[in-house]
Image (cartoon, grey):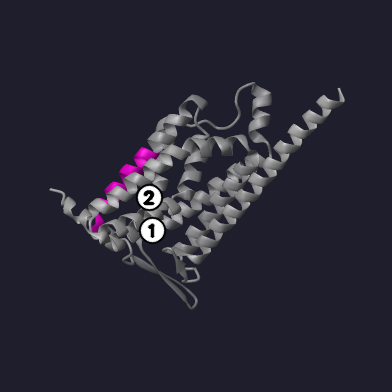
Amino acid sequence: MIDLSIFTTAEAWISLITLLFLEIILGVDNIVFISLTSNRLAPEKQHIGRKLGLAGAMIMRILFLSVASFLVHMVTPLFTISLGGWERPISVRDLILLLGGLYLIYKGITELRDTINLADEKQEAQTGKPGGKRIGLPQAIATIMVMDIVFSIDSVITAVGLAEHLIIMILAVVIAIAIMMIFIDVIADFINHNVEMKILALTFIATIGVLLVLDSLGINSGIEVLDMHMEKLMIYFAMLFSVIMEFLQLKHKSNLAKWTIEREGDED
């Protein structure tokens, strides 16, 4: 039986709000990745792909949290890498971050190269069909679920350390995923219809990949804010600044286009 009496305490609600905030903040990179992955689906399957991908990610996180005792062993060193005077114990967590980071670097760079070289547009011009490599719905969902482990591993371990009750951790995950489901279509469509945002998102994904690789090797400042290394927080702020700048530029272009049309109408 689940003991719901814990919600009569202020500590439980503080833990829930804190975890919910962390899940949403740390889920930004996951949302961007899901948006880019679902873009490779057929247009009529993109909506359901995003929803099912997030639902699958939620299931993975809940299963992850349900084996909290296993998470403790994920940071236990399996072996040690020694290079000169540098040594680094490698754990299961480190291997997951390393492999996931390398995949994100590969994904971000290859997609960025194709976008800049107009690969999709050229293919569509030659074949008359929508450009871009299409993937199936099962492949997209599986990719999103697997990569969610990479994105959420640190936040899940943090959740286990912050909250004593499993129900609080699961509730925070469910609410955070529900919020993501509300906004994922808007974010994905906006990225897809604005190439500047797509380039920014791909650069962000590749950069996060680099940070994950460095983190797996223990290369970081050691300074943590909001349970994130300072480097990742700086990337998040840089991303936010860049998004704001792109919004302002898009607004300027929109206003300029409207003003040009109105001026031409007045001249006629």
Q: Nearer the viewer, mark 1 or mark 2?
A: 1
Above or below — where is 82 with respect to 12? below
Measured as percent of width and height from the top left, residue 33 is found at 49, 44
Q: Residue farthest to the right?
A: 267
Residue 17's label in the rendered image is none
Identify the residue shown where x is 52% and y is 64%. 231
- Residue receiving disc 2: 149
Measured as percent of width and height from the top left, residue 146 is found at 39, 45
Measured as percent of width and height from the top left, residue 84 is found at 50, 76
* The quadrant where residue 165 appears: bottom left
Q: Crowding near pointer 2: few (<14 within 10 Å), some, many (20+)?
A: many
Indicate the secondary structure of the residue bearing disc 2: helix
* The quadrant where residue 17 appears: bottom left
Indicate the secondary structure of the residue bearing disc 1: helix
Q: Crowding near pointer 1: few (<14 within 10 Å), some, many (20+)?
A: some
Task: Give the CA distance from mark 1 to mark 2.
Answer: 9 Å
Looking at the rendering, the stretch of residues picked out in magenta corresponds to 54-69
- Residue receiving disc 1: 154
Dominant secondary structure (helix, strand or loop) of the stretch shown in magenta: helix
Magenta region includes residue 11: no
The reply to whether discs 1 and 2 touch (Cβ–Cβ < 8 Å) is no
Identify the residue shown where x is 47% and y is 39%. 184
Measured as percent of width and height from the top left, residue 157 is found at 33, 59
Left or right: where 60 falls relative to 248: left
Left or right: where 231 falls relative to 92: right
Q: Amino acid at mark 2?
A: Ile
Q: Nearer the viewer, residue 67 or 260?
A: 260
